[in-house]
Image (cartoon, helix red, strand yellow):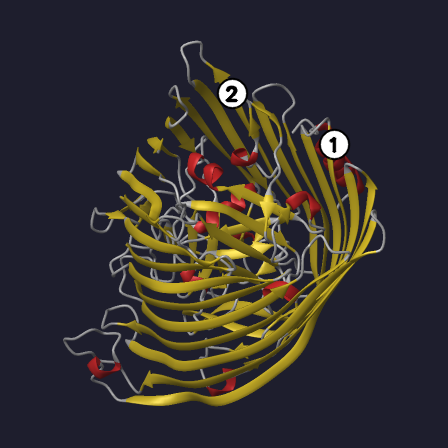
Amino acid sequence: MFKRNTLSLAILASLASITVQAADGDTQNKEDSGAATTLGKVVVTAQKREESVQEVPAPITVLSGEKIRDSSLQSANEVTRYTPNASAGTTDGHGRPRWWIRGLGTGDQGANTVSPIGIYVDDVYIANISATGFPLFDQERVEVLRGPQGTLWGKNTTGGAINFISRKPTFSPEGYFKVDMGNYANRIVEGAVSDALVDDKLAGRVSFHHQGRDGYTENKNDGNDQGALEDDAVRLQLAARVNDNLDANLNVHARHYHDTASYNTVSYGTRPDGTNQFGYSIDPKLGKANFNAKYQAEIDQAGSNLNLVWQLGELELTSITAFEHFTRDGWTDSDNTPLELQRSYSYADSQQWSQELRLASPRSDRLNWVLGFHYFNEDLESKNANAALPNVYVPSYYNNVSYDQKTESYAIFGSTTYNFTDDFSLTAGLRWTRETKDIDLERLVNRGAASFGDGHWWQPGNVDSPLIVNATQDESNTWSDYSWDLTPEYRISDNARAYFRYARGFRSGGYNAGVTSQATVAKVDPEYLTSYELGLKSEWFDGRLNANASVFYYDYKDIQLNIVTAVNNQTVSRLANGAQGEAYGAEFELEAIPVQNLHVNFGLGLLHTEFTDYTSGPNDYSGNHFVRAPNVSAVIGADYRIPLNVGGAVVLGTDWNTRSRQYFFTNDQSQNMRTGGYTLGNARVTYELPGETTRVTAYVNNLTDKEYRNHTLPTGYQTAAVMFGDPRTFGVSVTTDF
């Protein structure tokens, strides 16, 4: 629980920083000099219609495309850098982020595990967690919604929703080009061009992104860099004005990604002398690894979505039809040592189809509403293999878990707002979802000592020793339930509004894919969250300060837990549920222009989490904290613009992010399975050439070269693995708008 004095000091600190979020430079009104004098209106679509973020009765952090570009954010998970009570660490380069908001998320990176943080790209839900580490380029904005969003966004949004919104085609020439060069041979080339193809009828936009980088880590076993990556993506959009009442936007996109993965993972012995059971010892430091087997990941993504908007008199009908295809091949040296102890392989192929229809009345009506229907279908194929090849240390073995899973869901939803007076309104929303999941799973294991042929070890056909089936699951389950929200809002004055939000959300059920025997085959039931939140949104000093605050309480039941243990000297991640818990806290966000040319943002998150009832076998874990839920998280940033007499300007910018202690697992919260508090700082200097169309930026990320743990894993043979965050990186970028 928060100590009373700590909480008081934090609140006082946030109020004292009232001269200082949502850092959104492109939405600010600018005078001819280019200096922002007031905070401009930030338009969002968090409630499925355009409106000012300050008018939405919910906690939302917004990052503009310019903020993303100028701050050199490279991957989707980095948007949490500016969001209190949120994180999305990854140990796989730009792959498989672990999304967390207010203590809700999942550490299970299995292909069939859905996250309680809904990730959307242009309003399209992305089901596969591994598909959410995409590069950030040519973005209009990103909206981070905290708290359950089940009514309008769907079932799997108990923790929140994040919507990445790309820039759309324009009917006049527009675009940009950016080149970025940095240490570790980092190179980024990206850009976009947009123009009319048929006057006033058809416009197109092409956007592209390439990043290449050497590894951050030296593999002492072979002397090669580890963690190099290549990330290429392209997006083509066509916007058509079919007639006066119908607009269409077609988005076709593709991505290819390659990395030599786990660039920051080392294993160390857990025996008193720091060795494993074979006497192997390594000092777990950033930048040094030592392993002998293949570490690599290949990702291919492609998809399309067609958005249609009809004006039906005063009503608006929106249709979103989407398809996404994703594949991933991954290989790892599971023991992270030069010893031949463990190897692993994973493959996933998913195809998802979705259709959403929404009908909305004018937002200005005294009674306004949104009604909708959503359909989702996914075919998922997954294969996972683990082995110890013939060696002098341990008996060789082989196991393989493969499954096909089909998911089909339907949802009907609606939200309505009634303005009783100019100052008081009530919003109520309801969503009913029905979902069916079918799984066909089989686990193979070797009988006797495993032997392998000359082909790929991970393929069952290349295992020469007999294989037997030790676990199967052929099961179908259907779940249906409701999510809702009820939000009264009161306008205290022209510049301040208070709201109370009562909401219920759930995460759909599923299956444990981390089976080790028939006894571990399991169905996982849905989890439920009831949220109570009181918030305030306000603007002060003639538009120079936005100050928002909220306090919340979560009642969390039937929690789906990612339980990670070492079973038979292999790291096993399984999904189970049944625990109960609670979370409560407060958030403060401020954005200000305290003096001419200075823009400041500040965010503070205070959080307490606790499992109130959590037992597993003979063990009672009640009282443990939620995973990746620091008691205190804060971000502060500033940009100061210095106009030059010769034209142009110099912009000085910095942002700092601090987090207190975090735990990586629900069941093991010992010293080795957590990270202490840390603070990360970034700095940049930008020269704007006269005309403000070209900018040259020098930047440094992780300014102090802070070494911090990003993740840990229990492994076999009396070892543990530790993954470090990124080291100090720096570079120079040149961006030209046209």
Residue 627 location, quadrant: bottom right
Q: Nearer the viewer, residue 58 or 169?
A: 169
Question: In the image, residue 114 lies at what x, y percent?
Answer: 52, 69
Q: Are marks 2 and 1 in contact (CB under 8 Å)?
A: no
Label 2: how many Cα within 10 Å (few below 14, some 14–19, many 20+): few
> For the image shown, how many numbered marks are present on the structure?
2
Is 408 displayed left or right of 503 in the figure?
Answer: left
Nearest to N terminus: mark 2 or mark 1: 1
Cα separation, mark 2 vs mark 1, equals 32 Å
Q: Which residue is mark 1?
A: 15
Residue flagged by tag 2: what amino acid is it? Asp
In what quadrant of the picture does the C terminus appear? top left
The residue at 28%/39% (across/down) is 187
Q: Secondary structure at mark 2?
A: loop
Is 559 positioned to the left or the right of 357 in the image?
right
Q: Residue at x 38, y 43 (%)?
A: 286
Q: Which numbered mark, 2 or 1, is in the foreground of this view? A: 2
| Image coords of residue 49 (percent x, y) | 61, 55
Query: Residue 41 placed where, x, y %?
Result: 62, 38
**Of residues 156 and 191, the one drawn nearer to the viewer in this rendering:** 191
Q: Considering the numbered disc 1 on the image, is that residue within a helix, a strand or a loop?
A: helix
Extreme-left residue of the structure: 454
Query: Disc 2 marks which residue?
Result: 32
Label 1 crowd bin: few (<14), some (14–19), many (20+), radius 10 Å? some
Residue 298 visible in this rendered orientation of the protein: yes
**Is residue 410 toward the left or the right of residue 413 in the image?**
left
- In depth, the one of 236 and 655 nearer the eye is 236
As drawn, 436 above or below 277:
below
Residue 720, percent from left and from top? 43, 58
